[in-house]
Image (spheres, grey):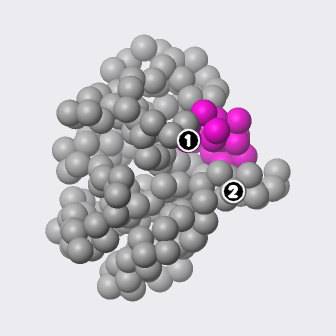
């Protein structure tokens, strides 16, 4: 088992354990710190979707910082079981929901009247075309004024109708904060 620590909020310094699965790469501490500086440290009242949950670092970090609802989607049985064990250890209650499903199937199953999320975390496996497949489904997942965080193997200007507002790079990881509408070019 591998582990990563939550870096802020109510569960700061608590460890998340996850299996040694191919392609599973938790968002580095420094990048998570930057992301939550961009989003704000308090996510009270916000609903978040972590569509490729993996280690759960992004979703649990959001819940630790007060998000009212966090849905974590993971297709691997073993990794989903580790997410459930972490949720139980943290005593998250009903604020965190673990869904064992494929990301595209989850996204496409959302009806037009389903509540949309305020924050979407997208950190899919690289070089498999996930972002292109998901881009047309983003409007049914994310509120019009919602914020999307994307990690990718290359720099992105857009993903669907969401445009990069801020971005950075850590090693091979390009990370982006995106909003619906025109980019203001801020970095």
Judged left or right of residue 31, residue 47 is right
Q: Position of residue 62 (x, y in %)?
A: 39, 59
Occupied quadrant, residue 97: bottom right
Residue 116 can be seen in this image: no
Residue at image point 60% right, 55% down: 103
Whether residue 177 appears in magenta in the rendering, the answer is no
Q: In this view, does 4 lie to the left or right of 98?
A: left
Q: Where is residue 43 in the image (x, y as percent from the top left)?
A: 42, 55
Residue 139, magenta (yes or no): yes
Magenta span: 130-149
75 and 109: which one is in front? 75
- Mark number, residue 148: none
Please tell me whether residue 153 is drawn above or below residue 69 in the rendered image. Answer: above
User: Label 2: which residue?
Assistant: 105
Residue 130 is tagged as: 1
Q: Which of 75 and 174 is in front in this view?
A: 75
């Amino acid at each position: 088992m591998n582990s990563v620590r939550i870096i802020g909020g109510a569960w700061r310094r608590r460890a998340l354990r996850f299996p040694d699965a191919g392609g599973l790469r938790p968002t580095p501490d420094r990048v998570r710190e930057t992301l939550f500086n961009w989003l704000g440290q308090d996510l009270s009242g916000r609903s978040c979707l972590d569509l490729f949950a993996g280690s759960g670092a992004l979703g649990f970090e959001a819940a630790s910082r007060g998000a009212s609802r966090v849905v974590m989607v993971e297709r691997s049985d073993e990794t989903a079981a580790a997410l459930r064990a972490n949720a139980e250890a943290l005593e998250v209650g009903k604020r965190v929901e673990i869904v064992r499903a494929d990301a595209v199937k989850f996204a496409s199953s959302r009806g037009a009247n389903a509540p949309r999320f305020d924050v979407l975390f997208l950190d899919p496996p690289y070089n498999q075309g996930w972002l292109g497949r998901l881009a047309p489904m983003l409007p049914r997942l994310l509120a019009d004024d919602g914020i999307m965080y994307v990690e990718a193997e290359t720099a992105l200007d857009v993903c669907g109708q969401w445009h990069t507002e801020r971005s950075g790079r850590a090693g091979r990881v390009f990370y982006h904060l995106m909003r619906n509408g025109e980019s203001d070019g801020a970095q």
